[in-house]
Image (cartoon, rainbow, N blue to C red):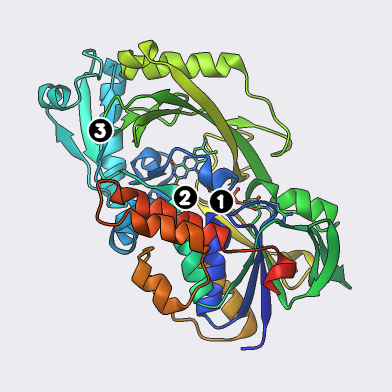
């Protein structure tokens, strides 16, 4: 196929979109203004959701999550921990909510089992003795950076060009048809023609549309913050048994514990502040589930912005976590799709559906194949991919040692280091 497709944004959405577009046979180029996965896709909780969190108020997202959870458990198992997820009721009211949770999970096809409180407390001794009810769901922990690197590697193996440190400064439209992009790399500006542009700039999608004078779909940028504690207080992902709220998730990530989050609408994803009040209230909520957290050193706080699809309510908690592929030909601009919403968990299906939409536009068939995601040496060697040799050698030298697990992050780094900006890619 000769159509040239550009993808803006090297987060999980853009990477999977580029991978499936290249697989479908399009000449695909991805542009990322910084390093790959440097925004929301590497500043989140690190969970592959079971969907249970959304089962009561957002069945569409709940079903998408459990379906992707199953697919990723098959195609990306080396990036997922074996930890399960649990919903904990700390009050009688929350224990009553458990019935709604169970029926929401049933409706969405999410396995959800009632567990014995005493047995659970002996397995997770730092959980508060106030625990009233506990249910198990298949939430998983993902090694997000490594996983995204494997998707980037796969996209490149399928033939996509990936340019980092290359900012799209404008989407160029002529007589209401998008014709290309204005790019800035290493302080040099250039223009490139494309037959279609996929705007997957996450929470920055509408900044770019505004700069380009193109009408934007309604998006609700919603800020979240996570607190990182030095030490692992549980071996499972903990959720509070209630409607999604602040400070109600604890994720064991390596040797740390991550507590999140808040949801506050912000005007601009590149300019926000985190209130100490929000941090304090999250800590208070986290301590209710695991009192030990209150005694542990807080290592750091990080934040990012969700690119949510607006439901008109102005309330980020009620907005769906499903996704939307907005075809700007609805507003008279052909050749431009803007992808918003979704989760890290659903990045694969968003990318697949984006490629399907592009195939529909160009009238071609689409038979997607799920990739087997891994970063094994064999795979890189077979693909003939250029890797940063120093990092590759360093990672390889750990093979078969006590420290062999460092091999995968090492390979991930090698992939990330192997892409250049647009001028060097060309
Ligand atoms: C607090 C919080 C916790 C979350 N926890 C979870 C969780 O546990 N599990 C889960 O599944 N989901 C979670 N999510 C949601 C998930 O993180 C996001 O839905 C997902 O990462 C969005 O990916 P993206 O690729 O659309 O956006 P991003 O990852 O933000 O990627 C967009 C990319 O576009 C680039 N870009 C922007 N403008 C330009 C430009 N002009 N030119 C070139 N590049 C540009 C950016 O640099 C960025 O890398 C969480 C979100 C938040 C905020």
Element on which disc 2 rests = helix
Q: Secondary structure at mark 1?
A: loop
Residue 130: x %, y % from top left: 24, 13
Near mark 2 (Cα within 10 A), the count class, few <14, some 14-19 or many ≥20, is many
Q: Residue furthest right?
A: 175
Residue at 52% across / 34% down in the picture? 317
Mark 2 lies on residue:
145
Residue at image mark 3: 235
Nearest to the observer: residue 38 or residue 194: 38
Going by the image, does 150 lie left or right of 273?
left
Residue position for label 1 = 37
> Mark 1 CB in 8 Å range of ligand 1?
yes
Name the residue at 29% across, 18% down.
Answer: 90
* Label 2 within 8 A of ligand 1 by Cβ: no
Counting labels gives: 3
Could you give the CA–CA distance between mark 1 and mark 2, rounded to whole angstroms? 7 Å
Instruction: Say which quadrant the N terminus sits in.
Output: bottom right
Q: Quadrant of the C terminus?
A: bottom right
What number is the disc on residue 292?
A: none
Q: Are marks 1 and 2 in contact (CB under 8 Å)?
A: yes
In front: 243, or 14?
A: 14
Q: Which residue appears at 67% of the width and 83% of the height?
A: 3
């Amino acid at each position: 196929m000769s159509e040239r497709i550009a993808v803006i944004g090297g987060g999980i959405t853009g990477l999977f979109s580029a991978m499936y577009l290249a697989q479908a046979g399009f000449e695909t180029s991805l542009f990322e203004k910084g390093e790959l996965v440097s925004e929301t896709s590497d500043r989140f909780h690190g969970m592959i959701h079971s969907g249970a969190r959304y089962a009561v108020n957002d069945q569409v997202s709940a079903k998408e999550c459990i379906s992707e959870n199953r697919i990723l458990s098959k195609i990306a198992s080396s990036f997922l921990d074996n930890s399960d997820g649990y919903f904990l009721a700390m009050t009688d009211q929350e224990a009553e909510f458990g019935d709604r949770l169970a029926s929401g999970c049933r409706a969405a096809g999410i396995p959800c089992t009632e567990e014995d409180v005493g047995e659970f407390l002996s397995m997770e001794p730092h959980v508060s003795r106030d625990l009233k009810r506990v249910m198990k769901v298949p939430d998983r922990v993902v090694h997000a950076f490594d996983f995204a690197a494997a998707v980037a590697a796969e996209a490149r193996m399928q033939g996509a060009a990936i340019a980092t440190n290359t900012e799209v400064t404008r989407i160029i439209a002529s007589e209401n048809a998008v014709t290309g992009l204005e790019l800035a790399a290493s302080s040099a500006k250039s223009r490139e023609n494309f037959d279609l542009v996929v705007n997957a700039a996450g929470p920055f999608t509408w900044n770019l549309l505004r700069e380009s004078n193109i009408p934007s779909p309604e998006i609700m940028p919603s800020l979240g913050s996570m607190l990182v504690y030095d030490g692992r207080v549980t071996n499972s992902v903990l959720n509070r048994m209630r409607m999604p709220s602040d400070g109600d998730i604890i994720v064991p990530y390596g040797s740390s514990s991550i507590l999140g989050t808040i949801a506050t609408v912000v005007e601009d994803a590149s300019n926000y502040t985190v209130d100490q009040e929000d941090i304090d209230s999250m800590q208070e909520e986290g301590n209710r589930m695991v009192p030990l957290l209150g005694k542990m050193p807080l290592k750091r706080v990080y934040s990012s912005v969700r690119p949510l699809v607006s439901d008109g309510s102005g309330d980020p908690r009620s907005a769906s976590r499903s996704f939307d592929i907005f075809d700007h030909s609805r507003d008279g601009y052909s050749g431009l799709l803007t992808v918003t919403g979704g989760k890290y968990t659903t990045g694969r299906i968003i990318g697949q559906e984006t490629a399907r939409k592009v195939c529909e536009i160009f009238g071609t068939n689409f038979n997607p194949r799920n990739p087997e995601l891994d970063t094994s040496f064999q795979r890189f060697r077979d693909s003939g991919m250029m890797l940063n040799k120093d990092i590759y050698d360093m990672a390889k030298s750990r093979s078969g040692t006590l420290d062999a697990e460092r091999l995968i992050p090492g390979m991930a780094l090698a992939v990330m280091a192997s892409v250049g900006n647009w001028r060097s890619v060309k």
